[in-house]
Image (cartoon, helix red, strand yellow):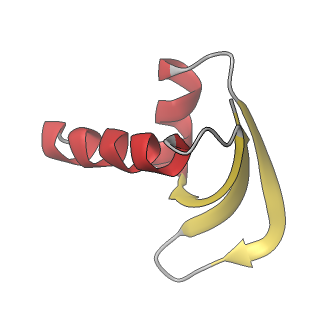
Amino acid sequence: MTSNEVERFEDFLWESFSEGVGIKELRISDEEKEYIKVKYPGISIRLIPGNEYLDKKTWFEVAL
């Protein structure tokens, strides 16, 4: 991801969890999923089956 994409994705993550909710369903790409796994190694990411779209983004349950 480019630095602009990383910045936008970080903003998206911050907004997604800003209300204090520890688990969210997020539609993210494989590249974004790998970024989360590296940047936040303690985070849990679980695939929600059957939800891949043409833009290659898939629904995942992401838990802090």
Q: Residue furthest right?
A: 49
Nearest to the observer: residue 52 or residue 15 = 15
Q: Quarter-wise, where is residue 51 in the image?
A: bottom right
> Total of numbered circles in the picture?
0
The residue sitting at 59% across, 27% down in the picture is 37
The residue lying at 47 percent from left, 20 percent from top is 39
Does residue 61 sit above or below 51 in this rendering?
above
The quarter of the picture where the C terminus appears is: top right
Q: Is residue 12 above or below residue 22?
A: below
**Image x and y of residue 25, in percent:** 69, 58
Q: Is residue 7 above or below residue 15?
A: above
Q: Position of residue 6 (x, y in %)?
A: 27, 39
Q: What residue is at 25 percent from the left and 48 percent from the top?
A: 8
Left or right of 42: which side holds 48? right
Direction front: furthest residue? 19
Quadrant of residue 52 within the rendered picture:
bottom right
Residue 33 in the image: state x and y as whole percent.
56, 42
Q: In the rendered view of the protein, which quadrant contains the N terminus? A: top left
Residue sitting farthest toward the top: 41
Note whether residue 1 is visible: no
